[in-house]
Amino acid sequence: MTTSSVTAPENTVSAILQDRAQVDTIIRRLLDQGISRDRISVIGKNFHTETRISGFLTRKDLVLGGLRQGGIFGSLAGSVLGLLTGVGVLFIPFVGTVVAAGPIGAVLLGAATGAIAGAAGAGLVSTFVALGLPEDKATLYQTRVEAGHFLMMVEAGANQMQEVQKLLQEAGGDEISIINTPLPRQRSGQIEAPTHLAPEVRSHLSEAAQQVYIDRYNAALIETNDEQQAEHIAWDAVHQQFDEDEHGVWSRQKAGV
């Protein structure tokens, strides 16, 4: 794989891997070939018995601000996954407790609380369909992860697509699929419009709450120059003014606010 003309990610290539050895080998090969570590994601259940994990998230523990770049995910010691950006564990309905490494963690965090699918308890299938996978492929991925296999997702530019697919195939990956977009992220810097919010944030907020979040985030970013701290401050402002409804959306204006 050459890296002299790497372009911005335009697609996400996904594949199922059978075991930890495959996961470790492919991550190292991708990194060696110039794929940025923040463009590689892995989901799996069978890391727990072999690796000590620091940090555990369930729905009641979720603090949406600060997930990006692993802000509230624990570290995964002794594993090649530690080379990736945000690594930690969370509970996914119908699948169980999984390790999520890389940017897919933010997407799954939203799904675990109903952000992507629009209702709590959606599992992986609705999340992957929302990202652009066919339902049959999304269902298969959930089944394979639940069975103990690993899902890897690699965001790649147009000039990298074939080589990433080849690498995954040669390393034993199967059920390879392509989503014609990179994984969603919140933009860095000031938030200019609700469409710039990360999906796991935006889908949890009513329009009024989105505006409160944006206004407080931008003000806090100017004050602190720290995006994670600005996210926490913005969420605090939302929690002070709104209550959560039955769908996990902060939409009910508090009395007297």
Image (cartoon, rainbow, N blue to C red):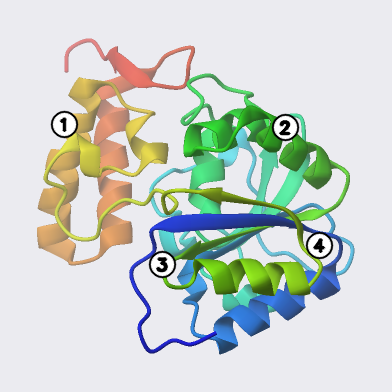
Q: Nearer the viewer, mark 4 or mark 3?
A: 3
Q: Is residue 151 left or right of residue 35?
A: right
* Number of numbered discs on residues: 4
CB atoms of marks 4 and 3 within 8 Å = no
Q: Is residue 75 visible?
A: no
Which is more N-terminal, label 1 or label 3?
3
Q: Nearer the viewer, mark 4 or mark 2?
A: 2
Q: Is residue 165 left or right of residue 254?
A: right
Number of other residues with Cα within 10 Å of mark 4, as a class: few under 14, some 14 to 19, many 20 or more: many
- Circle 3 sits on which residue? 157
Type of amino acid under label 3: Gly
Which residue appears at 17% of the width and 32% of the height? 212
Residue 211's disc is: 1
CB atoms of marks 3 and 1 within 8 Å = no
Type of amino acid under label 4: Phe
CB atoms of marks 1 and 2 within 8 Å = no
- Image quadrant assignment for residue 31: bottom right
Residue 235 vs 218, above or below: the answer is: above
Q: Is residue 76 left or right of residue 140?
A: left
**Residue 240, percent from left and from top:** 27, 29
Q: Nearer the viewer, residue 66 or 156?
A: 156
Circle 2 SS class: helix
**Residue 27, percent from left and from top:** 65, 76
Q: CA distance from mark 4 to mark 1?
A: 39 Å
Residue 139's disc is: 2
Which is more N-terminal, label 3 or label 4?
4
Which residue appears at 69% of the width and 40% of the height? 91
Q: Is residue 163 visible?
A: yes
Q: CA distance from mark 3 to mark 1?
A: 33 Å
Q: CA distance from mark 2 to mark 3?
A: 26 Å
